[in-house]
Amino acid sequence: MTGLQSGTVTGLDRGGDDRWVVTVEVVELERIPNTMDVMGTFEVTLSEDGELVGLRRRGRRRRSQTDQGTG
C-alpha cells in the first residue's frame, strides 16, 4: 500500500473487535551513510482473517537516532 518494502516488525498486539495491530519499521528514504536513512514507523491493523483494515504512520526518525525510552 505504501510502496515501501517491509522492514522490521517491532510490535504485535491483539486489538479490539477481533483485530491485530502490527507495528512495522521501514526505510522511507535511503541516505549515504546509511545511519542517515529516514525510518518510518507504521501501525497496520488487520482483521481476524488477515485483511488490511487500517494503516497509520506513527513517526519518522533517522536510523542513527535511538529510542530513549520513557522510564
Image: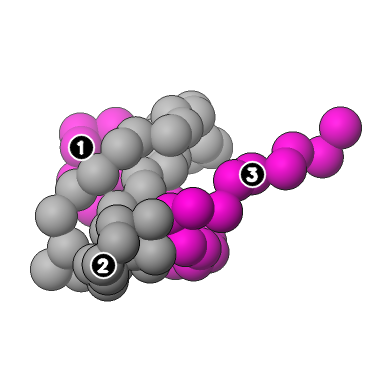
Q: Residue at x 72, y 43 (%)?
A: 68
Tell me where residue 46 sits by quadrant. Answer: top left
**Which mark sits nearer the N-terminus, 1 or 3?**
1
Of marks 1 and 2, the one in the foreground: 2
Q: Which mark is residue 50?
A: 1
Distance from the alpha carbon under mark 1 to that under mark 3: 29 Å
Q: Secondary structure at mark 2?
A: loop
Q: Which mark is residue 25?
A: none
In the image, 39 versus 57, the foreground residue is 39
Tell me where residue 4 sits by quadrant. Answer: bottom left
Could you tell me the amino acid type at mark 2?
A: Ile
**Which mark sits nearer the N-terminus, 1 or 2?**
2
Quarter of the image with the C terminus in it: top right
Could you tell me the amino acid type at mark 1?
A: Gly
Q: Would you name the residue on which mark 3 appears?
A: 67
Of marks 2 and 3, the one in the foreground: 2
Of marks 1 and 3, the one in the foreground: 3
Quarter of the image with the N terminus in it: bottom left
Percent x, y for residue 43?
A: 43, 52
Magenta residues, as a range? 43-71
Whether residue 19 is visible? no
Distance from the alpha carbon under mark 1 to that under mark 2: 36 Å
